[in-house]
Image (cartoon, rainbow, N blue to C red):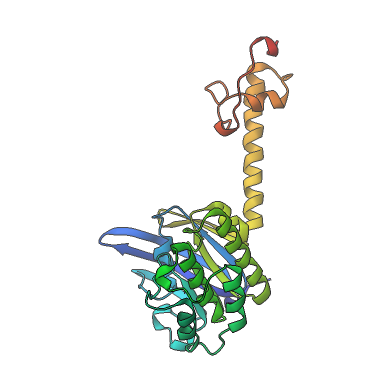
Amino acid sequence: MQTNKSDYVIETDRVCRSFKGTTALDNLSLRVPRGSIYGFLGRNGSGKTTAIKILAGLIKPTSGSVQVLGRTPFEFTTEDRQKIGYVSEKQILPAIFTVRKLIAFCAQFYPEWDHDLVRRLTERFRIDPKKSIAALSQGTQRQVAFILALAQKPELLILDEPASTLDVVARREFLDEILALIRQDGPTVFISSHILSDIERVADHIGILVDGTLKISEPLDELAETVKQIRFHSFTRSVGRCQAHFGPSVPKRKCWSLPASPMNPGLPKQRATRAPSTKSWT
């Protein structure tokens, strides 16, 4: 069945962006299906934040086309921006406000503001609404920013490294809450991270960015199957080399336990164990 263009919340076509002669994005073409959680994975400095700033309409691409919710980001109206929740990598909240006053200030700009969700999430994250923003840790400020972005009931939620400043336990709670809310309300989520486990925990589509180039973009289950096949074929080739050297009667588990070496190339070093003695092979 052919997919209509309206089925995608984000579409980019050969987007490039350079800064003073340095290429940050190189021919970025991606499609984010409506209702999906798209995990944008890459190392720090790979171009993730640059791509997100383009999607949010904060900077223009050097070349290529971008459509977000059917509009060019730099032409967003106020109504368009009300449909997009955005938490940046280095979110700065006004330090003079208390949490309660900041929530009240933001709520007046969004007609669909969800007060019940704000109350539930502040309790879930154990955020004291009477505290000033300046008194909150970086991780808690990031949670407040997430609450503000989600309370506006966006069609698209863009999260740039949202859990990077949280500890392990808080990060798990935070990501679980994202997953629960998405299942309940169904906005499309575009979430970037350099932590694979975070992306695997919530995403159903994966894009992998390497030095500004999108290397992979596909559903998570298809990617997992591809990796599984690569590992199987790699293992089979390694066993074949091992048995060719020691003889076909050598058990596969013995081949797998051999450390990587010129005699046994291709075996992953992280699975290597102590090599058996010569006597045990004869």
Image: 237 above or below 47: above
Whether residue 199 is visible: no
Q: Could you tell me which quadrant the C terminus lies in?
A: top right
* Residue 129 coordinates in the image, percent (x, y): 51, 76
* Residue 84 coordinates in the image, percent (x, y): 50, 78
Relative depth, front residue between 139 and 1 = 139
Residue positioned 42% across, 66% down in the render? 51
Residue 126 as seen in the image, left or right of residue 228: left
* Residue 223 coordinates in the image, percent (x, y): 62, 53
Residue positioned 53% across, 23% down in the render? 261
Relative depth, front residue between 159 and 232 = 159
Displayed quadrant of residue 25: bottom left
Displayed quadrant of residue 39: bottom right
Whether residue 116 is visible: yes
Displayed quadrant of residue 14: bottom left
Image: 179 above or below 269: below
- Farthest left residue? 20
**Number of residue marks:** 0
Residue 58 as seen in the image, left or right of residue 145: left
- Farthest front residue? 130
* Residue 130 coordinates in the image, percent (x, y): 49, 76
Image: 24 above or below 127: above
Q: Could you tell me which quadrant the N terminus lies in?
A: bottom right
Relative depth, front residue between 149 and 169 = 169
Relative depth, front residue between 256 and 108 = 108
Residue 180 as seen in the image, left or right of residue 31: right
Image: 262 above or below 84: above
